[in-house]
Image (tube, grey):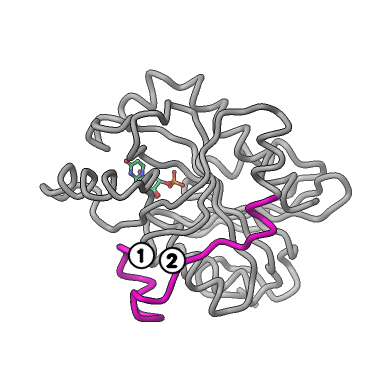
Amino acid sequence: MTGQPHILLQPGQVSERVILCGDPARVTRIASLLADAKPLASNREFTSVNGQFQGHPIAVCSTGIGAPSAIIALEELIKCGGRQFIRVGSAGALQPQIALGDLIVAEAAVRDDGGSASYAPVAYPALANRLLVNGLSDYLQQYLQRHHLGIVRSHDSFYTDQELAICRQWHKLGVLAADMETAALFTVGRLRDVAVASVLNNVVLYGEHAADGINDYVAAETIMMQGEQLAARAALAALCQ
Ligand SMILES: O=P(O)(O)O[C@H]1O[C@H](CO)[C@@H](O)[C@H]1O
Ligand SMILES: O=c1cc[nH]c(=O)[nH]1
């Protein structure tokens, strides 16, 4: 049996507590925080690992870029046993006070993606699970880490010519940062009655074009790697509270 068509896992193979991330390389880094980490499967953009944190079974799975592949991962992970999910992602700031490596805990997300629209009209809100949000922000407060709580925007348009104007519009409305998966995960998670939250590491300063910021990601690697590690630790604490 090959299991689910994309993640290649079987029902029962995935822990209830799951960390999601876009980049498959991040799975290995997050799994280094787990005890007894064992690779599960790797297919296309979906790489998965099982391990333990403070005695709790935890799975980590990459979702690739954008809503369609994130939704596929979420749907298949739910079929295999996942019930609580935290995305440990990266984002571009939409507010000037958000520094590189700062973390953004999403309370809700603007649904500017196409994937979630195929599940529910865009008037349906994309809301995070409150308990997981509290767990994330409690952990970050306890360690006095710079973080920001609020609304993010998820989109499908990394290279559109209108991107800076679009960002300016959401900036004026107080939206904190942009990513490409949070809204879809929140929407589909609600519809499937599972808990979802998202903590994002800022890799682009407000006013920079996303593509330039991603180049800076390499130059400013240390500070953003610290952000990623902290986001993963906060996610583990929130899932195991
Ligand atoms: O670093 P990840 O988790 O992939 O998140 C962000 O990075 C990708 C774009 O570079 C998109 O997936 C966006 O949501
Ligand atoms: O600016 C950015 C950076 C990462 N991901 C995005 O979606 N936008």
Q: Considering the numbered disc 2 on the image, is that residue within a helix, a strand or a loop? A: helix
| 57 sits to left or right of 134 | right
Q: Position of residue 90 (x, y in %)?
A: 45, 41
Q: Nearer the viewer, residue 166 or 185?
A: 166
Above or below — where is 142 with respect to 174? above
Residue 27 on the magenta segment: no
Please state which amino acid type lies under the numbered disc 1. Arg
Q: Position of residue 59 (x, y in %)?
A: 69, 55
Q: Which residues are magenta?
A: 111-134
Tell me, yes or no, whether the two marked residues, 2 and 1, touch with CB atoms within 8 Å.
Answer: yes
Residue 111: mark in rendering: 1
| 92 sits to left or right of 198 | left
Q: Residue at x 71, y 39 (%)?
A: 139
Q: Residues within 10 Å of mark 2 (few under 14, many from 20)?
A: many
Please state which amino acid type lies under the numbered disc 2. Ala
Residue 121: mark in rendering: none
| 60 sits to left or right of 56 | left
Q: Residue at x 39, y 81 (%)?
A: 120
Residue with the mark numbered 2: 184
Residue extending furthest toward the left:
161
